[in-house]
Image: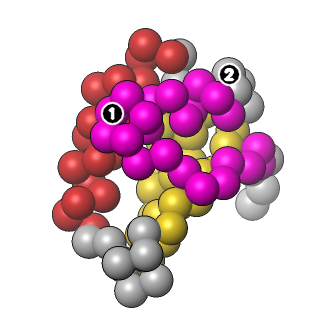
Amino acid sequence: MPLYMDVHTIAQGVAMADVAQAHKADLQQQGRHDVSYLRYWVDESQGKIFCLVEAPSAEAAAAVHREAHGLVADHIFQVQEGS
Protein backbone atom coordinates (compact mmCIF):
# COMPACT_ATOMS: atom_id res chain seq x y z
CA MET A 1 0.00 0.00 0.00
CA PRO A 2 1.32 3.51 -0.76
CA LEU A 3 2.81 5.68 1.98
CA TYR A 4 1.90 9.34 2.37
CA MET A 5 3.26 12.16 4.51
CA ASP A 6 0.80 14.91 5.21
CA VAL A 7 1.65 18.36 6.51
CA HIS A 8 -0.61 20.59 8.57
CA THR A 9 0.09 24.21 9.48
CA ILE A 10 -1.78 25.64 12.47
CA ALA A 11 -1.15 29.40 12.40
CA GLN A 12 -1.69 29.97 16.13
CA GLY A 13 0.61 27.07 17.11
CA VAL A 14 -0.22 23.60 18.30
CA ALA A 15 0.12 21.57 21.49
CA MET A 16 1.38 17.99 21.50
CA ALA A 17 -1.53 16.93 23.73
CA ASP A 18 -4.06 18.25 21.21
CA VAL A 19 -2.36 16.38 18.38
CA ALA A 20 -2.40 13.18 20.45
CA GLN A 21 -6.18 13.54 20.84
CA ALA A 22 -6.63 14.14 17.11
CA HIS A 23 -4.49 11.07 16.36
CA LYS A 24 -6.71 8.94 18.61
CA ALA A 25 -9.72 10.15 16.63
CA ASP A 26 -7.92 9.23 13.38
CA LEU A 27 -7.32 5.70 14.68
CA GLN A 28 -11.02 5.32 15.40
CA GLN A 29 -12.00 6.33 11.83
CA GLN A 30 -9.18 4.88 9.72
CA GLY A 31 -10.61 1.38 9.20
CA ARG A 32 -13.60 2.78 7.35
CA HIS A 33 -11.24 3.92 4.56
CA ASP A 34 -8.64 1.09 4.59
CA VAL A 35 -6.12 3.59 6.01
CA SER A 36 -3.48 3.16 8.70
CA TYR A 37 -2.06 6.25 10.41
CA LEU A 38 1.39 5.07 11.55
CA ARG A 39 3.24 7.97 13.21
CA TYR A 40 3.13 11.70 13.66
CA TRP A 41 5.58 14.47 14.49
CA VAL A 42 4.87 17.90 15.92
CA ASP A 43 6.74 21.22 15.90
CA GLU A 44 4.72 23.11 18.49
CA SER A 45 6.41 26.49 18.04
CA GLN A 46 6.00 26.48 14.25
CA GLY A 47 2.48 25.04 14.33
CA LYS A 48 3.48 22.11 12.11
CA ILE A 49 2.15 18.57 12.22
CA PHE A 50 3.47 15.74 10.01
CA CYS A 51 1.57 12.45 9.71
CA LEU A 52 2.80 9.23 8.11
CA VAL A 53 0.00 7.10 6.73
CA GLU A 54 -0.54 4.00 4.63
CA ALA A 55 -3.54 4.57 2.41
CA PRO A 56 -4.94 3.48 -0.92
CA SER A 57 -4.94 7.17 -1.98
CA ALA A 58 -4.29 10.67 -0.69
CA GLU A 59 -8.03 11.24 -0.81
CA ALA A 60 -8.67 8.32 1.56
CA ALA A 61 -6.08 9.68 4.01
CA ALA A 62 -7.70 13.13 3.89
CA ALA A 63 -11.16 11.63 4.45
CA VAL A 64 -10.04 10.12 7.76
CA HIS A 65 -8.81 13.50 9.06
CA ARG A 66 -11.94 15.24 7.80
CA GLU A 67 -14.28 12.78 9.50
CA ALA A 68 -12.23 12.36 12.69
CA HIS A 69 -11.63 16.01 13.61
CA GLY A 70 -11.84 18.29 10.58
CA LEU A 71 -8.12 19.20 10.51
CA VAL A 72 -7.39 18.41 6.87
CA ALA A 73 -3.74 18.60 5.81
CA ASP A 74 -2.44 21.51 3.75
CA HIS A 75 -0.33 19.12 1.67
CA ILE A 76 -0.18 15.36 1.16
CA PHE A 77 2.89 13.82 -0.47
CA GLN A 78 3.32 10.24 -1.62
CA VAL A 79 6.66 9.07 -0.18
CA GLN A 80 8.95 6.06 -0.24
CA GLU A 81 10.73 4.85 2.86
CA GLY A 82 14.52 4.76 2.93
CA SER A 83 17.09 4.07 5.59
- Tell me the quarter of the image containing the N terminus: top right
| The quarter of the displayed image where residue 68 is located | top left
**What range is drawn magenta here?**
58-79
Task: Name which residue type carries label 1.
Answer: Ala
Q: Which mark is residue 68?
A: 1
Q: Which residue is mark 2?
A: 56
At 59% from the left and 25% from the top, the residue drawn is 60
Label 1 element class: helix
- Say left or right for 65 vs 80: left
12 falls in the magenta region: no
Characterize the local packing of mark 2: few (<14), some (14-19) or many (20 or more) Cα atoms within 10 angstroms.
some
- Give the side of residue 70 with respect to residue 34, left or right: left
Looking at the rendered image, the disc whose residue lies closer to the viewer, 2 or 1, is 1
Is 44 situated left or right of 37 in this image? Answer: left
Residue at screen point 22% across, 49% down: 21
65 w.r.t. 5: above or below: above
The answer to whether residue 52 is left or right of residue 68 is right
Q: Label 1 near label 2: C-beta < 8 Å?
A: no
Give SS at disc 2.
loop
- Asked which colour scheme the image uses, the reply is secondary structure
